[in-house]
Image (cartoon, helix red, strand yellow):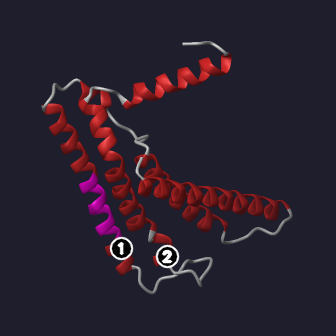
Amino acid sequence: MSRFAKIVDQMLVWFILIQMVALTAVVIYAVIARLMGDSVSWYDEIAAIQLSWLTYYGGAYAALHRRHIGFDSVLLSIPMPLRGYAVCFAEAVVIGFFILLAYTGYQVLVVLEGEYLVSLTWIPIQLTQSVIPIGAALFVLCEILSFPHYFDQCRRGISLEQTEIDEEVETELAKAGVKT
């Protein structure tokens, strides 16, 4: 992984961690408030927004590590050099979709100008919905950063799924003290 990819990785990890802690705090606060008979009106709206932010940034993190849904076995069944073209085509389709999502998300932000949340009227909806173009752009960046390694693995006929399984088996065997 390149130095820049490692920086992106760490930024995503910290953002996701902070989002998870914040979401947990909001949920716990809302539950305690409800149990004490003082329900908060903003809980549902804020928790839903936090969950969407967590989902988009988590998706970008998964893309950086090639942990999203994929079909390595289908690609690996295609003989070379057609496999290389298929991998590039699949990558272009994914990146094209997220570029379209980022563009459309930006258009949504323009439409939402001047709108505010219902329960917290000082928070602009543009801020909460900015996750769509930002998350899509991050996904594209992470796909591009992880593509060279992925392409090399596919070219060599190595399944990332199988590599992950093999690494997990080796880790568990090492924990058990079994030499391979």
Q: Which residue is mark 2?
A: 127
Q: How many callouts does the rendering have? A: 2
Q: Position of residue 139 (x, y in %)?
A: 38, 56
Q: Is residue 137 above or below residue 173?
A: below
Look at 15% across and 39% down and name the residue there.
85
Q: Are there few (<14), some (14-19), or many (20+) residues within 10 Å of tag 1?
A: some
Q: Which disc number belongs to residue 108?
A: 1
Q: Which residues are magenta?
A: 95-105
Labels 2 and 1 touching (C-beta < 8 A): no
Q: Residues within 10 Å of mark 2 (few under 14, many from 20)?
A: few
The image position of residue 70, as x and y in percent, is: 34, 36
Q: Nearer the viewer, residue 17 or 33?
A: 17
* Amino acid type shown at disc 1: Val
Q: Looking at the image, which residue is at 68% across and 58% down?
A: 21
Tell me, for residue 94, which label it has, or none.
Answer: none
Between 172 and 37, the one lying in front of the other is 172
| Front one among 42 and 150 | 150
Where is residue 171? Give x, y as percent. Answer: 58, 24
| Mark 1, secondary structure of its residue | helix
* Labels 2 and 1: the sequence-earlier one: 1
Quick check: 94 left or right of 137?
left
User: Is residue 99 covered in magenta?
Assistant: yes
